[in-house]
């Protein structure tokens, strides 16, 4: 499985795969340098405690996960990561591009079917708040508000198909 792992403003490509010898990780840094190494990773008990061995070095990890956000504690240090599969990362980039291009207009990042509208005209929304669920390729994608403000127009309703770039909602 391929992931985009973001720590602060830096995003890394991480692929986790199985081989006959067990798990291995293929890591690509932001400069394009690729590194592969075997990893032994196991849950310890039923909580958020894990054991990981990388390059013959053992780590005890506590991982707190909230959706795509992961906080990892190991050896007295705390690390925060946003972990997304490639599809989710691509979807978020399309939404961010649409938000920058359209100001207060929330546009469809891809063609799809509107399955749910979570706001109405006159509602006040916060940046990052879910507004529309758009189904594309049998996957539901939550379209979030690019900015805080008041919803001035809602141009869609559940059951309607939309095209890429179509204005779904306007925020004033």
Image (spheres, rainbow, N blue to C red):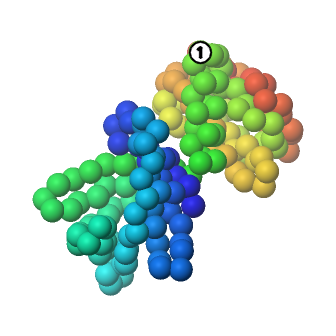
- Residue most extreme to the left: 76
Q: Residue at x 43, y 59 (%)?
A: 36
| Circle 1 Cα neighbour tier, 10 Å, few/some/many (<14 / 14–19 / ≥20) | few
Q: Nearer the viewer, residue 55 or 83?
A: 55
Q: Give left or right: position of 169 versus 70.
A: right
Q: Nearer the viewer, residue 126 or 74?
A: 74
State whether residue 140 appears in this view.
yes
Q: Residue at x 76, y 25 (%)?
A: 165
Residue pointed to by mark 1: 103
Residue 103 lies, with reference to residue 142, above or below; the image says: above
* Spot occupied by residue 159 in the image (x, y as percentages of width and height): 85, 44
Residue 102 lies, with reference to residue 110, above or below; the image says: above
- The answer to which quarter of the image holds residue 106 is top right
* Spot occupied by residue 90 in the image (x, y as percentages of width and height): 62, 40
Q: Give left or right: position of 159 versus 74.
A: right
Q: Give left or right: position of 97 versus 50.
A: right
* Spot occupied by residue 15 in the image (x, y as percentages of width and height): 51, 57
Q: Nearer the viewer, residue 131 or 73?
A: 73
Q: Nearer the viewer, residue 167 or 21?
A: 21
- The answer to which quarter of the image holds residue 172 is top right
Q: Residue at x 31, y 81 (%)?
A: 44
Identify the secondary structure beneath mark 1: loop
């Amino acid at each position: 499985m391929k992931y985009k792992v973001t720590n602060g403003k830096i995003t890394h490509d991480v692929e986790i795969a199985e081989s006959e010898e067990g798990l291995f990780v293929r890591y690509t840094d932001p400069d394009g340098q690729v590194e592969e190494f075997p990893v032994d990773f196991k849950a310890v008990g039923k909580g958020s405690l894990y054991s990981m061995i990388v390059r013959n070095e053992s780590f005890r990890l506590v991982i707190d996960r909230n959706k795509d956000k992961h906080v990892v504690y190991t050896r007295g240090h705390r690390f925060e990561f946003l972990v997304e599969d490639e599809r989710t990362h691509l979807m978020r980039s399309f939404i961010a591009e649409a938000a920058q291009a359209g100001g207060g207009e929330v546009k469809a990042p891809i063609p799809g079917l509107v399955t749910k509208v979570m706001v109405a005209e006159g509602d006040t929304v916060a940046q990052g708040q879910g507004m529309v669920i758009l189904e594309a390729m049998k996957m539901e994608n939550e379209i979030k508000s690019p900015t805080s403000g008041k919803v001035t127009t809602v141009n869609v309703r559940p059951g309607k198909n939309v095209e890429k770039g179509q204005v779904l909602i306007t925020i004033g």
